[in-house]
Amino acid sequence: MNDGDPILYRGGLLNPLTPDRWEYHEDGGLLVQDGRIQRAGAFGSFTDIPESRVLELDGVLVPGFVDVHIHWVQHHVRGRFQMDLMEWLREHIWPEEAGFAEAEFARRYAQAFFADTSRAGTTMGMAYSSPHAEALQIAADAAVGDWLLGNSIMERSAPEPLCRASPENVDAIAPLLEALGPSRYVITPRFALNCSAELMKSLGDLARQSGAHVQTHLSESPIEIREVMEAFPEATDYTDIYDRAGLLSPRSVLGHCIHLSERELDCLARRGAWIAHCPSSNEALGSGRMDIESVRRLGIPFALASDVGAGPSHSMLHVMQRFLAQHREAHVPVTVREALYRSTLAGAQCLGRGNEAGDFAPGKRADFVLLPAPERRTSPEDWMEEILAGRQQDLETRPLGTWIRGERKAAA
């Protein structure tokens, strides 16, 4: 086939629409041209496409996975330490992140991170970098897929080398924001304990003026909450700290949000802020279960995320598995339909890419993943349950191929 010719990919097709609905074609077609989706549907409807432009695939196509909260600088130690959040950070993670001051160290791990995530089917994400500006640029240059990146802002309450490397005001962030642009650079106050109220207020102003996204952490562990409230005695609660700083908006992505009061949940709903729900990480550190019942009741938008390296795996299939297991264990109804939606279209909407990716709507980028075909005739729900079964290592290598803008990036 010549470059620029349309290609019709033939295989099963599973397209997420809402948390409760998807469209499935056992024999489907995905027409792609110049990296964009032209049409998707039953294969029999593509009578105008010559056989020479059909590429048959043995499997089921789903949209590329989206991970809205991951620390690429922790990928090399993912799942290695399991303890309460604050001890985990101070004893293990922050010392590891200090190593990203070295460019070759950062370059090696950036390449490994993007190779592994694309192999596992992730085509888009929002990632925390270390505070180092050079490491952030290295990650931006190495990125495979559509990634929003931010260097962690850690002005205080952290090891001195990280505080020294961190931007200390908005002027220090300006060159990075200009280099990557507001669609790729994320303003990243790591969490309230690492920033003064004054700095967070200036970051909130910058986010509003630039239109950039904000990512941070909120209410992951009881010890974290206690330390934060001791540092900000004037605040009503943890969420109030961010709200006073102007950091809560529909472009804000807040990791975890496990231990929130009704007032805090209502505040997030009113501000339209997104929650990055990290079930595998919440399990690994024993942080607790997000109150998905209240989040749903109040209509707070959320998407799934791995939170590597507290999360033990970069695979969004693994995250979906733990999402189902954690809430089902608490007798909360969750379905594979919702798991797929929260890992694809919801993630794209969370990152401001809902018009660009996340499902198979015409005009969107041709970002998709090939998963193994069912061994027998079965419902898409039963097939998806089977796809999400197995060990972490199995799920990381289960995708048979990943396409980004119509180009195959990873294969078994």
Image (spheres, rainbow, N blue to C red):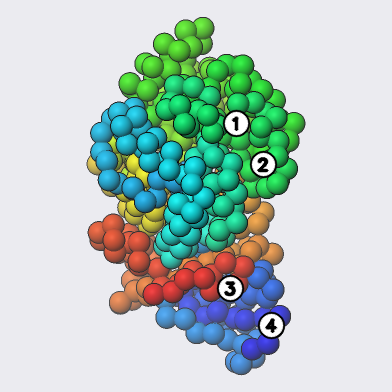
Which of the marked residues, 2 or 1, is nearer the chain's N terminus?
Answer: 1
Work out how far the residue at label 4 is from the one at label 1, CA to CA, in angstroms. 44 Å
Residue located at (29% from left, 61% from top): 393
- Between 351 and 196, the one nearer to me in the picture: 196
Q: Give the foreground label among 4 and 1.
A: 1
313 relative position to 208: left or right:
left
In the image, residue 400 sits, relative to residue 57, either above or below, namely above
For disc 1, the neighbor class at 10 Å (few under 14, some 14 to 19, many from 20) is: many
Residue located at (37% from left, 16% from top): 226
Q: Position of residue 77 (x, y in %)?
A: 33, 47
Which of the marked residues, 3 or 1, is nearer the chain's N terminus?
Answer: 1
Secondary element at image label 4: loop
Figure quadrant of the C terminus: bottom left
In the image, residue 348 sits, relative to residue 389, either above or below, namely above
Is there any visible trace of residue 340 in the rendered image? no
Residue located at (58% from left, 73% from top): 407
Residue farthest top in this picture: 234
Amino acid beneath label 2: Leu
Residue located at (64% from left, 26% from top): 169
Tell whether label 1 touches label 4 (CB within 8 Å): no
Per the rendering, the mark at residue 407 is 3
Tell whether label 1 touches label 2 (CB within 8 Å): yes
Amino acid beneath label 1: Pro
Residue under pointer 4 = 3
158 relative position to 355: left or right:
left
Q: Position of residue 363 (x, y in %)?
A: 69, 64
Residue under pointer 2 = 176
Tell whether label 3 touches label 4 (CB within 8 Å): no
Work out how far the residue at label 2 is from the one at label 3, CA to CA, in angstroms. 29 Å
Which of the marked residues, 2 or 3, is nearer the chain's N terminus?
Answer: 2
